[in-house]
Amino acid sequence: AQRLAPWRVTTSLLAAEAALAEPAHDRLEVAERALQRARWWRPGSAALATAAAEVALADRRVPTGAARVWTAQRVQPRSKPRRQAWIDLMNRLEGSGDATAR
């Protein structure tokens, strides 16, 4: 579906959700590539940036994940479920930062 309509974000988000459900490096890489392609078509998508941050963090690439969270924060997701996912991710990152500061 993504090859037929690469400007649609749903397939990329589904790939990310599937990879995060069972995080293995190869699945996370496939999701990362799908999200990169989708972000090329929609660079201002906060939902894609949030999903890319989740995938990067699951693959233990913290600086990349943090940069993508910052990108999502700049735009902020419009849909309620995507916005809640972004808020949850921000809260997790802020909580982990507080824990390391102690």
Image (cartoon, rainbow, N blue to C red):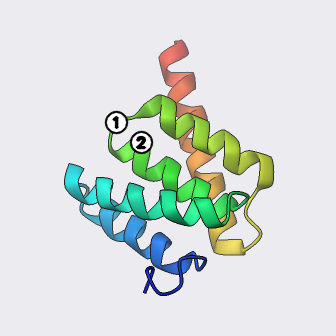
Name the residue: 79% across, 54% down: 75
Residue 69 is left or right of residue 62, and the answer is right
User: In 3D space, how far apart are the residues under numbered discs 2 and 1 (Cα atoms)?
Assistant: 5 Å
Q: Secondary structure at mark 1?
A: loop
> Residue 43, relative to residue 13: is it above or below?
above
Q: Amino acid at mark 1?
A: Arg
Name the residue: 21% across, 54% down: 26
Note whether residue 52 is visible: yes
> Residue 88, relative to residue 93: is it above or below?
below
Name the residue: 22% across, 49% down: 25
Residue under label 1: 60
Q: From the top left corner, tell me how far across and down residue 98 is, in percent.
A: 57, 23
Q: Secondary structure at mark 2?
A: helix
Q: From the top left corner, tell me how far across and down residue 13 is, in percent.
A: 49, 71
Residue under label 2: 57
Residues at circles 2 and 1 in contact by the CB criterion of under 8 Å: yes
Residue 50 lies in quadrant: bottom right
Q: Which quarter of the figure is the N terminus placed in?
A: bottom left
Residues 38 and 65: in front is: 38
Q: From the top left corner, tell me how far across and down residue 69 is, in percent.
A: 62, 44
Which labelled disc corresponds to residue 47?
A: none
Residue 46 lies in quadrant: bottom right
Residues 33 and 51: in front is: 33
